[in-house]
Image (spheres, rainbow, N blue to C red):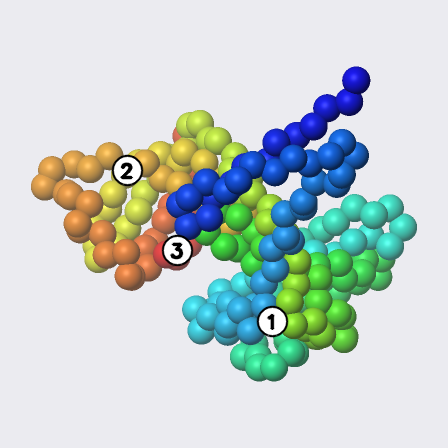
Amino acid sequence: MGYQTIKTGTDNGRANTPQVVNEGQEREEKPEKKISRKQIVNQLNYRNFQDDAIIVNLKHVRFGHVVSFQAKPQPCAENEINCEWVDPEEVGRKLISYEFESIGLAHENANLILTPELANIDASSVRLILSENYYPLKVEAIEHYPCIGINAQVIQNSAIFKGTLTDFSADSFHIKLSLEPPQTSQWINSESSVEVVLSNDHETLYSGECL
């Protein structure tokens, strides 16, 4: 015996009249989320203002696996994107056997994956064209990897805060601090950069300026 589905919903807080959907009738699909070209340009210009980078994904022309490189977007308007590689020497070697696939923009705790048209790519930069007014909004979660046994120092304005590295991703990392009196969290100015030193019992693993 066949079956029927009863659909209900709300209209300004009021329940709609239940509708009977005949067996075999296609269910209504959710509309695809999209991001406008203007929103993409605004995000890229913001990263240029912050001297920040985006991710450019390259795909192996034969085997299909993907490698990712950082590139810094230059000021853009209308529909053209110009990005300069952070590591041009390494990219130059890969371009022999890899081709452009997509770009990734870090957004909150996820990556926005976009596929603009390729205009030019070489060892110094990549130029892309946003030919569409709207792009499908593909979101990928940024995977964080847990850490054990990594000591951390956060230094700002001659104050040294000690702690441990709890996890990291390709975009960011988390440090748990142990505040020693008279230290308080208010001593750290989130608007200014900090120097971070990560180490284990044998060597320094990372040292650099972060926000």
Dot 1 amino acid type: Arg
Q: How many marks?
A: 3
Sequence-first disc among 3 and 1? 1
Q: Is residue 191 above or below residue 162?
A: below
Is 18 on the left-hand or right-hand side of 121?
A: left
Q: Position of residue 33 (x, y in %)?
A: 60, 55
Which residue corresponds to mark 3? 210
Is residue 72 visible in the rendered image? The answer is no
Mark-to-mark CA distance, 3 and 1: 30 Å
Circle 3 crowding by C-alpha within 10 Å: few under 14, some 14–19, many from 20:
few
**Residue ID at (61%, 31%):** 6
Q: Position of residue 126 (x, y in %)?
A: 70, 71
Observer-side mark, 3 or 1, equals: 1
Observer-side mark, 2 or 1, equals: 1
Which residue is nearer to you in this view: 88 or 54? 54
Q: Position of residue 168 (x, y in %)?
A: 48, 40
Dot 3 amino acid type: Cys
Which residue is nearer to you in this view: 192 or 180? 192
Q: What's the mark number on residue 177?
A: 2
